[in-house]
Image (cartoon, coloured by chain):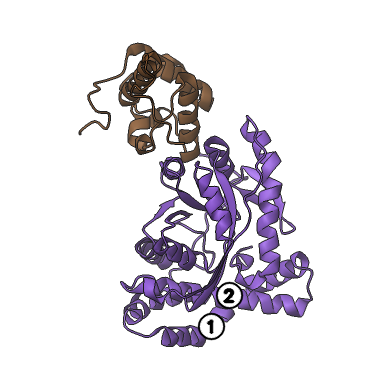
Amino acid sequence: MESLVKDAGSGSRDTMGRIRRVFIESLHVNLREEDFSYETKLDEAAGMDSVAVLEFVAAIEKEFGITFEPEMLTIKVVRDLKELAAYVDQRTARRSHASASPSGHGPAEVDPA
Amino acid sequence: MPASNPNSTPPVTLPLVTLNDLLWLLYLYPLRLLASVLPRWSLYAIGKLSDPIVQFDARRSKARAAKWIAQACRTTPADARRIASRSLTNTVIRTLDGLLLLRRSSDKMLRCRDLDGIQHLESAIAHGKGVVLLAGHFCANRIALRYLATKGYAVLSVHNRRPRNQAQGRLGKLFLQPLSAQLQERANPDQVSIHDPDCSLRIMRRLRAGGLVALQIDGRRATVVGHPFLGVPWRLRPGIFEIVRLSDCAVVPILCLGRSSGFRIRFDPMLEIDGASSRETFISANLPRFFAVVEKQIIEYPEEWRLWNHL
């Protein structure tokens, strides 16, 4: 299946590790990071209801200082640790690039809000 | 053999068919087909003919509703009984309007008599973070939202596709309810079910794009948050509050009254939201205000609220 995240294979191990930690902390699930692999679908690791998914997204945004684009707010992206990490890396890189741009006209992160 | 648990609830055995199922069977097959060709007035006439059967079928729930109405609306028992009956009749009309919404030409059939407070909606949209239209379960909601979509205000609505129906038998549960849900979705494709795992994400997606989402706050479903509503203990999902808290969207009360042949829509001024970092404090700060708005609407127009008979 074609990835929703363009040109991104999978996220860095560091990002995936941080996401797993956020997942456990934000949802207060009784799991250890070692309990689920990078291939695990997050909603299968702990039964997440629809609101819990939203809370998880909010926690990721806070952790990484990014904002999800509206079209990326899908269960497909959020449940897949690799795809999610790739997207987070992409957004984080875009934000860093924008803040480093001397003209201030770099490809800044679009805050849809 | 496992020991039986004396505290567990015994499974409820549903009858195969109930009177309610037969009414739904008539509605979903012959009446639905007829509704594609019959003029609206004749459809309403059929509704009027079926009204005594509906009233009879719901006599017990109506008696319970009348007591509740008398207490909540501070009215006489006779008036409360009248309101309970009218609420049922309006629910029948709403169901028939649901068939009209399946027509290709349905948008032309929606007659909006009044659209009040549109400036409140416009200023909420200008806020730029999306708008939650706070609603109660009023009979005219569906037609009003369809009408608003034709005027350029597309509204994502949130539904329970598996509503509890105490008068339902096995036939209804297995066949009629899923078909009814499918038709409802055809009548208004811009909706999401609370049972979808990405329900909240879809809502957030719409809000972040600056769009509109209608949320009915008076759905009585879960056991997570309890608060009195219209004088009785009420249980609701806290999801609505979590969505408002995390999206920082504007909240505008909406009131929809009437039927497809003549209805009105009213927007009230944006609600002030008490921001709070945690879910619990946000709910306790805002829930009474949200409930008060909808309670006031219901007491003002009790005949148009359709949950009296669901107590």
Q: Which of disc 1 and disc 2 is earlier in sequence?
A: 1
Helix, strand or loop status at disc 1: helix
Give the image location of residue B257, x and y in percent.
57, 70
- Note whether B9 is above or below A41 in the view shown: below
Query: Is there any visible trace of residue B73 in the rendered image?
Result: yes
- Note whether B112 is above or below A60 in the view shown: below
Give the image location of residue A10, x and y in percent.
27, 20
Disc 2/disc 1 C-alpha distance (Å): 8 Å
Q: Which chain is purple?
A: B
Mark 1, Cα crowd under 10 Å, few <14 / some 14-19 / many 20+, is: some
Residue furthest to the left: A1
Q: Quadrant of residue A101?
A: top left
Q: Which residue is mark 1?
A: B51
Relative to the observer, which residue lies in front, B77 or B156?
A: B156
Query: Is there any visible trace of residue B135 in the rendered image?
Result: no
Give the image location of residue B98, x and y in percent.
42, 71
Instruction: Specify the label residue B88 is tagged with.
Output: 2
Q: Which chain is brown?
A: A
Relative to the observer, which residue lies in front, A31 or B126?
A: B126
Q: How many marks?
A: 2
